Structures are given as C-alpha cells and as structure tokens.
C-alpha cells in the first residue's frame, strides 16, 4: 500500500494571462506525505496548443522530493 497523503488542488490563472480573463487556466496540486513530509510533491497542470497550432496537449509539471522538476506531455488520441 502507498503512503498516507493529504492532497489539495487549487485553480488559478497563469501569470501571463490577462487581468480581465477570469477563467482559471492552471491546476496546482500539493501532495503532502503525512508520515514523511520531506517526501511530499507539488505540481501544476495546464492545457496548451501543440506546435502544429491545431491540437492541444495536457502539460503536467511535478516537483520531486529532491527539488528537481519533471514535465510530462499528454495528448488525446482520436
């Protein structure tokens, strides 16, 4: 079984968004490890246009317990 975690999510606008756009664009998450807080992780997810300008992909950045960041890209298959 996994470690007990406390997970929170919060929608927010990206820093580059215009002030008049009130639609949240990024989903921030924090996964707090209840037994070992030093093993907690945080991340952010958002959707952006792909290089082809037509399709979109989900971008997921995750900060690992070591402090390093990793980025994953998810695309929807038709």
Image (spheres, rainbow, N blue to C red):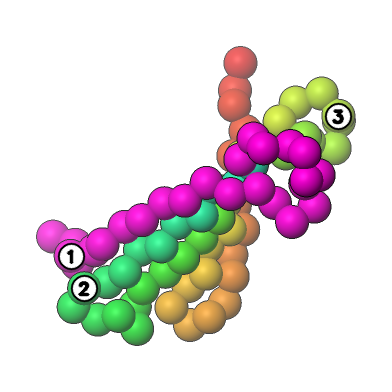
Q: Secondary structure at mark 1?
A: loop
Q: Secondary structure at mark 3?
A: loop
Kindly check if marks 2 and 1 are in contact, taking CB atoms under 8 A apart as contact: yes
> With 16 as the anchor, is 1 left or right in this view?
left
Number of numbered discs: 3
Which sits earlier in the primary sequence, circle 2 or circle 1?
A: 1
> With 4 as the anchor, is 46 left or right in this view?
right
Q: CA distance from mark 2 to mark 3?
A: 42 Å
Camera-side residue of 27 and 50: 27
Residue drawn where x is 48% and y is 72% of the image: 64
From the image, give the main secondary structure of the stretch colored magenta.
Answer: loop
Kindly check if marks 2 and 3 are in contact, taking CB atoms under 8 A apart as contact: no
Marker disc for residue 34:
2
Marker disc for residue 4:
1
Residue behind mark 3: 53
Q: Secondary structure at mark 2?
A: loop
Identify the image quadrant of the C terminus: top right
Measuring from the top left, give residue 27's x and y in whole percent.
Answer: 53, 48
One can see residue 56 in this view:
yes
Check residue 69 for magenta coloring: no
The residue range painted magenta reads 1-24
Check residue 22 for magenta coloring: yes
């Amino acid at each position: 079984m996994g470690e007990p975690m406390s997970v929170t999510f919060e929608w927010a606008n990206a820093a580059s968004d215009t002030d008049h756009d009130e639609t949240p664009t990024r989903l921030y998450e924090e996964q707090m490890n209840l037994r070992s807080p030093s093993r907690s992780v945080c991340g952010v997810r958002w959707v952006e246009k792909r290089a082809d300008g037509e399709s979109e992909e989900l971008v997921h950045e995750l900060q690992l317990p070591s402090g390093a960041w990793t980025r994953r890209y998810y695309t929807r298959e038709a």
